Image (tube, grey):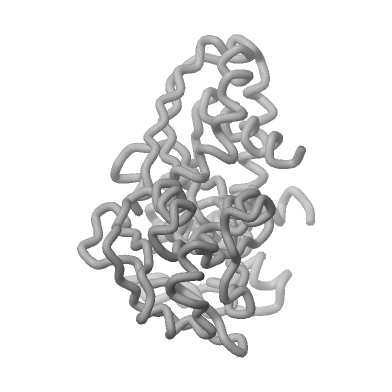
Amino acid sequence: MTSGNYSDLLALRCIIDHGSFVAAARELRVSRSALSETIRRLERDIGVQLLNRTTRSVSPTPAGERLAARFGVAFEEIEAAIDEAGAMGADVAGPVRVHAQRLGYELFLRPLLPEFVRRFPRIGVEVQIDDAGIDIVSNRFDVAIRLGEMLDQDVIAFPLQPAIRQIAVAAPSYLNRHGLPHHPRALRDHLCICFRWPGHDALYNWEFAENGVWFSVPVSGPLTFNDQRAALDAAIAGAGIALWVESEVRPYVEDGRLVPLLTDYSAAFPGFALYYPPHRHRSAAVAAFIAAVREAAKT
């Protein structure tokens, strides 16, 4: 790719974003005729039409839409890398607002934050910890940590861990009284420790996979929490069957306090990711925070 190709692709993306040559030319500070020539040159070089043009509107062809989408992801990554490189000075200052699911906070922020504030004493980090599925743009968060399958649309995301599984578990005392479930649907006849996502009226249906196909099972029981760790504590005490991330239940399985159940039906799904809106101008403080989380996840 030449520098000219890069500029031409930026122009294509800008036209598609605005849906107009006039608005794109205004943002890029070039004439409409120059911008039209840029797109004609790009189409000639690639050998395919990228935009449908009429006297009233402009829209991408399938080839143009795909090219712009793939280039957009690469462009945001390049821009983020430049921002992060420029944010490594200790005198960086400013606020950073972070939203994190509870387990995401425990795994990736709690170990990081003490060293981060020592390194960047002039950055003020505000962290909101809950499991609510929120729109981080409308709620004015700069970055967030959430399970990969729950990310907002049109964000830049960086996986913080490989795929994970949820495992159903119960204490030996519970299983001695109620027996083992041999299929996820048998959970309907057991005392399950339920979970309610913040902001949702319905209880969370437990999810499993069989022969590569995901399915959900409505569960019920005398206990319902909005915190999975509390549900795990209740399971350890013998109150019922709980479902949580495999890495979090493993220590209790290894010491015999919990027994894993239905593992043949526990399939992997995307783990936690750091994500943020695709703003073109990110503050140095936010860029420094993103860089620190990404670097910590690699170690």
Residue visible at 39% across and 38% down? 129
In the image: residue 7, left or right of residue 177: right
Q: Position of residue 10 (x, y in %)?
A: 58, 53
Q: Position of residue 235 (x, y in %)?
A: 45, 56
Residue visible at 44% across and 58% down? 238
In the image: residue 2, left or right of residue 8: right
Q: Is residue 75 visible?
A: no
Q: Position of residue 257 (x, y in %)?
A: 58, 53
Q: Locate the C terminus and report the quarter of the image it occupies.
A: top right
Residue visible at 66% across and 24% down? 86
Q: Position of residue 107 (x, y in %)?
A: 58, 40
Residue nearer the viewer, 87 or 221: 221
Residue visible at 57% across and 58% down? 258
In the image: residue 245, left or right of residue 18: right
Residue nearer the viewer, 215 or 138: 215
The relative height of residue 154 versus residue 53 in the rendered view (above or below) is above
Residue nearer the viewer, 132 or 34: 132
The relative height of residue 198 versus residue 202 in the rendered view (above or below) is above
Report which quarter residue 121 is drawn in: top right
